[in-house]
Image (spheres, rainbow, N blue to C red):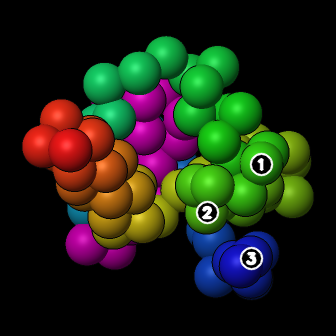
Amino acid sequence: MSLEVAHCAPVETTQTTPETPWIGPEEAAALLGVGTKLVRAWADSGELRGMRTPGGHRRFLRDDVVAFRDELLDAHRQERSA
């Protein structure tokens, strides 16, 4: 699934507000508890939904990152209980 670039306004900061729900790889990595290289790898493989701005910068919807984190945690819990 891809996101339309037309919905992405340039983001000057990585702080999320209701008006700018897009975050960069650094904030996504912080939310996921991983490094930015892994965030980029997940995005490149399609596991984590994201898009690139016209300038080539990666952006992720904060809600998508939180949902992805929750999926990872659920999978981890299921592995531990098996």
Residue that numbered label 3 is attached to: 2
Residue 73, label in figure: none
Q: Quadrant of the N terminus?
A: bottom right
Say whether residue 32 is visible.
yes
Residue 41's spot in the image, x, y percent? 71, 33
Would residue 54 appear left or right of 26 to someone viewing this image?
right
Above or below, comparing residue 2 to residue 44 in the picture: below
**Which residue is depicted at the point 61% across and 63% down?**
49
The residue lying toward the viewer, choosing from 28 and 16, is 28
**Residue 1 magenta-drawn?**
no
Above or below, comparing residue 24 to residue 75 in the picture: above
User: Mark 2 falls on what kind of element?
Assistant: loop
Residue that numbered label 2 is attached to: 49
**Mark 1 crowdedness (10 Å alpha carbons): few <14, some 14-19, many ≥20:** few
Identity of the residue furthest to the front in this view = 82
- Residue type pointed to by label 2: Arg
Which residues make up the magenta segment? 18-30
- Residue type pointed to by label 1: Ser
- Dot 2 or dot 3: first in sequence order is 3
Total labels: the figure holds 3
What is the CA distance from the residue labelled 1 to the residue labelled 2? 9 Å
Residue 53's spot in the image, x, y percent? 77, 57
What is the CA distance from the residue labelled 1 to the residue labelled 3? 12 Å
**Residue 20 magenta-drawn?**
yes
- Residue type pointed to by label 3: Ser
In the rendered structure, are the residues bearing label 2 and label 3 in contact, judged by CB atoms less than 8 Å apart? yes
Residue that numbered label 1 is attached to: 45
